[in-house]
Amino acid sequence: MNLVNPMYLWGLLGLIVPLAIHLWSKREGRIIQVGSIRNFPVSESKKSRSMRLNETILLLLRSLLITFLVLVLSGLTYQTENTKGSVALVDPSVFNDPEYRTVMDSLTNAPEIELRLFSLRFPLINTLPDTFDYTGRFDHWDLIGALPSLSADHYYIYSKSRLSDFKGKRPIVAGTYDWITLPNRSDEMHLITAFESNSGEIRCIVAHSNDQLLRSEIRDVSDIPNAQTRNTSEGVQVKLNDGIWIPVQKNQPTKVSLFYDRGFEYDAQYLKAATEAIGTYLDINVQVSSLPLENAPPLSDINVWLSIKPPSSPEQYQIIYSLDEFSDQLLVKTKDYYRLTRRLDREVVFREDLVGSLLPLFYNSESVNAQLDSLDSRVLPVDQIQSLGEEKKELGKKMVRANLSNVLWIFVILLLTIERIVAFRRKQ
């Protein structure tokens, strides 16, 4: 047993009070001289013996009352073994992968371990399904923060530990955790989108992902191994290996209009050079024109507003200059357009990668980013997951500390009630 506040043990000195009262009641009485004791009984009365017994009982009750009260204030606790059991949680993303069926089968054949799904509300898994309809992804940090609701002392978590599944702040939780990261497949090439270049070649945006790296690049279809093309009534399509057929976007001229105010002539020149560089890099037809603000309203595919004054019709523009010195990005995506947060010069163009920032305007960036996110196989290091809380080492011994305050308070109230009843009846 342990005491949280041992300094309150000084309160045991209060035991002197009932002892002193008891001894004080034992002092000799006054001697009263009388003429004769002939009529007094010789034997001791029953009432006198009862009073002495009652005093002893009250002494014991009051001493116990003070002792229990001091133990309550001292915070008496005791350690006991935690036998809440173990829980195995399996990330839904691994169920449909045949490489991990052996691991899943071994978990279902372990009756001492409770098997649950590592997803919202941690549903029980009684039998292993042949296929699992998995939709949606949940933040792993949020799930870990909710694990104490299962009231287990040991957690085994099987997951691919993808970096994209961990967002926000890591929780501080108590418990013993064994995080098993199941290996991802080897680095493979995935086709994201395809388009036709000026030279008639088919160019593809492909992605590579493994445990440490996610990268994308643009390559000619003729340079990609195992790439296949076919002509359909809807146009040319391309696919890689056993993937799905993706339509090739036709090469159509992309018109870009730069509308600038006085003092923004150099900004317009940098933007024009950057868009022309994109056309050369992608081998697509990009037509760029620079026009003062007083010219006709924009009618192009991509329209840029370069002025301190905001445009009267912002919905007609894809890029609008809006100074923001605290932004860490050159182009910031809003609901309807991009904000250009800085004036352009040679240093800003190269440091902030103006060409790379403009690339999403020339293809469906939201679709590409969504596909890249689904292919992201980068893994969060296990050492960043395993140390989940400061109490992990202490609880790893499977010992928990139980507080006895509630039980002691019951004894205090019970003793106080008995003491008052005895004192009232004996008038002491």
Image: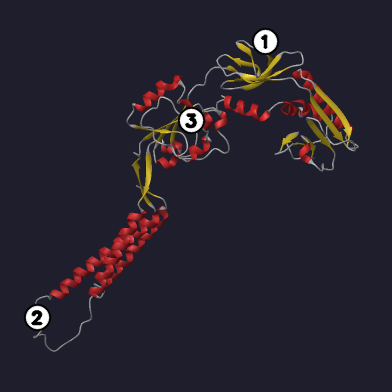
Q: Quadrant of the C terminus?
A: bottom left
Q: Is residue 68 left or right of residue 280?
A: left
Spatial distance from mark 1 to mark 2, Cα to Cα?
A: 129 Å
Asked where in the image residue 81 lies, by quadrant, the reply is: top left
Query: Residue drawn 45% across and 37% down?
Result: 392
Q: From the top left corner, tell me how far across and down residue 127 is, in percent.
A: 36, 29
Give the numbered dot on residue 232. Answer: none
Q: From the top left corner, tell me how far across and down residue 330 is, in percent.
A: 76, 33
Q: Which sits earlier in the primary sequence, circle 3 or circle 2?
A: 2
Viewer-side residue, 337 vs 124: 337
Q: Disc 3 designates what residue?
A: 134
Circle 2 SS class: loop
Q: Residues within 10 Å of mark 1 (few under 14, many from 20)?
A: some
Report the number of discs: 3
Q: In the image as oriented, which residue stretches furthest toward the front?
A: 233
Q: Which sits earlier in the primary sequence, circle 1 or circle 3?
A: 3
Asked where in the image residue 333 lies, by quadrant, the reply is: top right
- Select label 1 or label 2 by which is in front: 1
Circle 1 SS class: helix
Q: Is residue 249 above or below residue 395?
A: above
Q: In the image as oriented, which residue stretches furthest toward the bottom?
A: 35
Q: Residues within 10 Å of mark 2 (few under 14, many from 20)?
A: few
**Amino acid under disc 3:** Tyr
Asked if residue 210 shows in the view, the reply is: yes
Q: From the top left corner, tell me how far across and down residue 407 is, in percent.
A: 32, 55
Query: Residue drawn 55% across and 32% down?
Result: 165
**Amino acid under disc 2:** Pro
Q: Disc 2 designates what residue?
A: 41
Q: Is residue 192 above or below residue 142?
A: above
Given contact means CB atoms under 8 Å apart, are the residues at marks 1 and 3 in contact?
A: no
Q: Disc 1 designates what residue?
A: 222
Circle 3 SS class: loop
